[in-house]
Image (spheres, grey):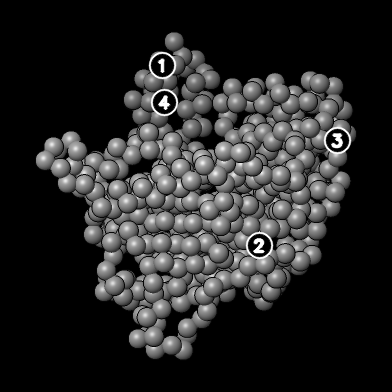
Amino acid sequence: MSSKNPHSSTASTASTASSTTIASLFSPIQSAADITLDTVYQNISASSWKQLFTQARQAGLEEFIADFQSGKPVNQSEKRPALHFALRNLSKTPVLIQDQDIMPPIAKVWQRIEALCNQWVGVTDVIHIGIGGSDFGPRLAVQALSYVPHINSRGMRMHFLANIDSAGLAHILERAHPNSTRVIVVSKSFTTLETTLNAKAVVDWLKAHNRTQTQIAQALFAVTANVPAAEQFGVAADNIFPFWEWVGGRYSVWSAVGLPIALQYGFDTYQEFLAGAHAIDQHFFTAPLEQNLPVIMALALFYQQEKHHIQSIAVIPYADALEDFPKWLQQLDMESNGKRIGRHGQLLKYSCPVVFGSAGSNAQHSYFQLLHQGLDIIPIDFIAVREPMSKLPEAQTHHRQLLANCLAQAQALANGKTSDNPNEDYPGKRPSNFLLLPKLNAFYLGALMALYEHRTVALGALWDINSFDQPGVELGKVLAKPIEQALLTSSEPNLISADATIDAVTAARIALLKK
C-alpha cells in the first residue's frame, strides 16, 4: 500500500540556524503542500512578527511540538498522548507508545477498510450514526468530495444521523431501503446517548421490515474503543473497527470513523485524503516556526487578540463544497480551546474566540455588513480554490467572479473607505488571512483540515490550554438525566434537598412542558 502522495512540504528544519538567519526565514506569504497562506492583510509589522516568534519560543512551542510528535502525554488531564497524526502516517514510520509501535495495528485497519470497499456491493443506503467528532469530519469530507468533477463514486445515499430529534431520523428512514441499507455506529465509548438511541431506533426499523437477526448483524458495523459493548449491541466481531483512546473525537476522521469516505469514493481516494493530512504533519513537525503555516496562523490570531481583544473569528470558504467546513471547525476550535482554566490550573487571559462562517459569496449577503462596519473587529480567513469545481461552459466565468469577490472583500476590509457620509465610511484595518488551494480534491481537503488541526493545537500551546480534553461538555449530560425522569413522571421535581439537581426555573419549565 503506497501513500500515492506526489507532494512534499516546502519547509526544512533550521535547528542549527542562528537567530538572525531564523528571523530572515519569515515572509507574510508562505506555502506548504502546495497550499499558499498570505497574511499581508493581518497588518502585522516585521518587528511585531519577530516579537511573536520570540514569544512562541518563550512559551515553549517548539518543545510542545516535539513532545506532541514523540507521543508524550500532551493531554495531561487524561494522561494520554494525542497521536491522531499516526492515523494518516502512510509512510508507516514507527510511532511509539511505551516503546510499542502503534503503526502495525493502524495499517491492519487500513487493510480491513480496503477489503470492505472491495466487498461492499449492492448497497443503496448507508446510515452513519454518530455525533460531534464522530459526525462532523466524515460528513464534511463526503459532502465536499461529492463536488469533485468526475470523482469515482458508488453513488450510495449517505445519511448522517447525529441529533436525537426524531424528525431527522424519520427523514432518513423514509428514503432508505431496508433490504440494501448498511448501518455504521460510531462511538468511542459506545455509550453516547444520542448515538445509542438512534442506533436502537434504526435496528427496530430493520426488524419492522422483516430483516432477520442474521441479516441485521450483517448490516451493522461499528467504530469504537469499547468492543464488548458493540458486540453486546449485536455487531459481529468482524464488523467492528477499533478506535484508540489516544484519538480525540474531533481529531478522529482519519481513523475508521472516516469509513464513509472510503466506501463512497474508493480506497485510493481515502488514501489521498490521508496523504494530504500527512504532508501537513510533516511540515508542522519539521518547519521552523517562521515558515510553519499552522504556527503563523496561530500567531496571527494571538496577535489580534492581544491588540484588539477580539471575541470572534469568521472563516469564509469561497467554495460551495466547503459549506460544512466552518461547522467542523467550530467543534475543533471551541471544544479544544474553549476554556477558562489553563493546563496548570490558572485563570486564562485569552482562549478560543467564537468561530462562525459559511460559503462565500453567500456570506457577503448575510453578515458582511457587520464585518465591514460593525463595532467589533472580527478577523477572517478567506479560503479560495484556484480551479473551478465544475465542467459547465460557464465554469470559468463564474469562478472568475467568485475569486474576484473573495479578493475584493479582503481588500475592502483591509483598506476601508473614507467618506463625509458616515453611512458610507468604512474604517478598514480588519485583519484577514488568504488561503489558496490549487484545487479541491481528497488530498487538498485532507491537507486543509490538518492545517487547521495543527493551528488549533499551536494556539492551545500558546494559551497554555490542553487542546485534547473537553470536561465542559459533561455537566449538561449529567443534569439531563434527572430532568428526563421528571418529564417522564407525574410527580413534582425534587427541590427540597440542598443538592437538588433541578432548580426552580427548570422545574417551572418542566411543568410547562407537561401541561
Judging by the rendered image, the residue that carries numbered circle 4 is 494
Q: Residues within 10 Å of mark 3 (few under 14, many from 20)?
A: few
Kind of residue at disc 2: Ala
Nearer-N-terminus badge (4/3):
3
Q: Residue furthest top?
A: 515
Q: Residues within 10 Å of mark 4 (few under 14, many from 20)?
A: some
Kind of residue at disc 3: Gly
Foreground residue, 252 or 9?
9
Q: CA distance from mark 4 to mark 2?
A: 55 Å
Nearer-N-terminus badge (1/2):
2
Q: Position of residue 367 (x, y in %)?
A: 34, 36
Foreground residue, 443 or 411?
411
Nearer-N-terminus badge (3/1):
3
* Residue 122 tag number: 3
| Rendered residue at 53%/67% (across/down) | 32
Nearer-N-terminus badge (4/1):
4
| Rendered residue at 39%/72% (across/down) | 27
Q: Position of residue 462 (x, y in %)?
A: 37, 66
Dot 3 falls on a residue whose secondary structure is loop
Q: Position of residue 327 (x, y in %)?
A: 49, 42
Kind of residue at disc 1: Ala
